[in-house]
Every structure is written in C-alpha cells, then in structure tokens.
Image: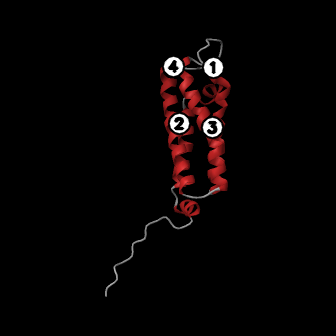
C-alpha cells in the first residue's frame, strides 16, 4: 500500500514540469501560454516541487503531521487541477503538449490520482502506520458492577 502511495505521489511530482513554461506566460510567441495560465502553471509547480517533500516525508517519517500534510497536499492538488480546468475552458492553450496528448482529461486524471491518494491515506492500515496505533475508535460495552 505504501509503495503505491509513494509511486502516485512521485508521479504527481511531475507537475513541476510547468516550471519550464512560467517565464513564457503571456509573451505571445508561438506555443507560449496565455497570461491566464500563469496561476495554473505556478500551482502545478508548487504541487510538483512540494510533492517531492511529501514523498520523502511519507517514506521516511511518521506521525499525525506527516499524514495531515499529505492529506492537505492532495486536497490542494485537486483544487489546483480543477482550477486549471476552468482556465482551460475559458482561455485555451492548444499548443501545450499535455493538452495535445490527453485533452481536457488531463486535469481530471491528476485530480483522480490525488483522490485515490486521499482514499489510500484514509485506510486504517495506512493510518496505523503513520499514527503508530490503530486509529479506529473502539466501542467498549459498559462494565456492569
């Protein structure tokens, strides 16, 4: 389970490739992203770069703060992907190779990967690994005296 979590996290770190496009936003050259794409490009870069830190923490550390950081990172990743989809609908960037390859589905693929990670992080066995104890509440019947 942890291997899958690390694999998906590292795959999503690939979103940092947008660092190569940020400086070209709004320049108007062939293949340059429209200025409206600056926010999604920065968001992807932040999610991608921070994904490396999240992967490291998930692999090497434990505790509530690591698990919580991973949940928050994934929630922000979904928000960023859906925000980028809205920008895609309003200001297309047809020259972007990822859009040429996957179309608008690329935004939903990224969001789905983050959602899968959230689901995996919420599994009892994963929570137990990071918390060091079974996180599920136990209900004990009252003791009659």
**Pointer 2: what residue?**
108
Instruction: Report crowding for label 3: few under 14, some 14 to 19, many 20 or more residues within 10 A (C-alpha).
Output: many
Q: Residue 13: percent from the left, percent from the top? A: 64, 40
Q: CA distance from mark 3 to mark 4?
A: 23 Å
Q: Quadrant of residue 92?
A: top right
**Percent of width and height locating residue 136:** 46, 65
Which comes before the other along the chain, label 4 or label 2? 4
Q: Is residue 11 above or below residue 136?
A: above
Label 4 environment density (alpha carbons within 10 Å; few <14, some 14–19, many ≥20) = some
Of callouts 2 and 1, which one flags the residue occurring earlier in the amino acid sequence? 1
- How far is mark 3 from mark 1, CA to CA? 21 Å
Looking at the image, residue 138 sits to the left or right of residue 33; the answer is left
Judge depth for marks 3 and 4 and give the one in front.
3
Residue 106: quadrant of the picture: top right
Q: Earlier in the sequence, mark 3 or mark 4?
A: 3
CA gap, disc 1 and disc 4: 12 Å
72 or 103: which is nearer to us? 72
Do the residues under discs 1 and 4 have CB atoms within 8 angstroms? no
Q: Gap between marks 2 and 1, in whole Å? A: 19 Å
State if disc 1 and disc 2 touch (CB < 8 Å): no
Inter-mark Cα distance, 3 to 2: 16 Å
């Amino acid at each position: 389970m942890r291997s899958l979590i690390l694999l998906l996290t590292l795959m999503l770190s690939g979103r940092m490739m947008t660092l190569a496009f940020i400086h070209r936003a709004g320049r108007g050259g062939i293949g340059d992203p429209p200025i409206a794409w600056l926010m999604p490009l920065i968001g992807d870069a932040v999610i991608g770069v921070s994904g490396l830190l999240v992967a490291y923490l998930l692999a090497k550390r434990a505790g509530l703060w690591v698990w919580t950081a991973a949940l928050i990172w994934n929630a922000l990743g979904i928000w960023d992907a859906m925000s980028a989809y809205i920008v895609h609908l309003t200001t297309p960037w047809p020259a972007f190779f990822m859009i040429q390859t996957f179309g608008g589905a690329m935004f939903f693929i990224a969001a789905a990967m983050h959602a899968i990670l959230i689901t995996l992080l919420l599994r009892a066995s994963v929570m137990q690994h990071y918390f060091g104890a079974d996180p599920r509440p136990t209900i004990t019947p009252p003791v009659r005296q």
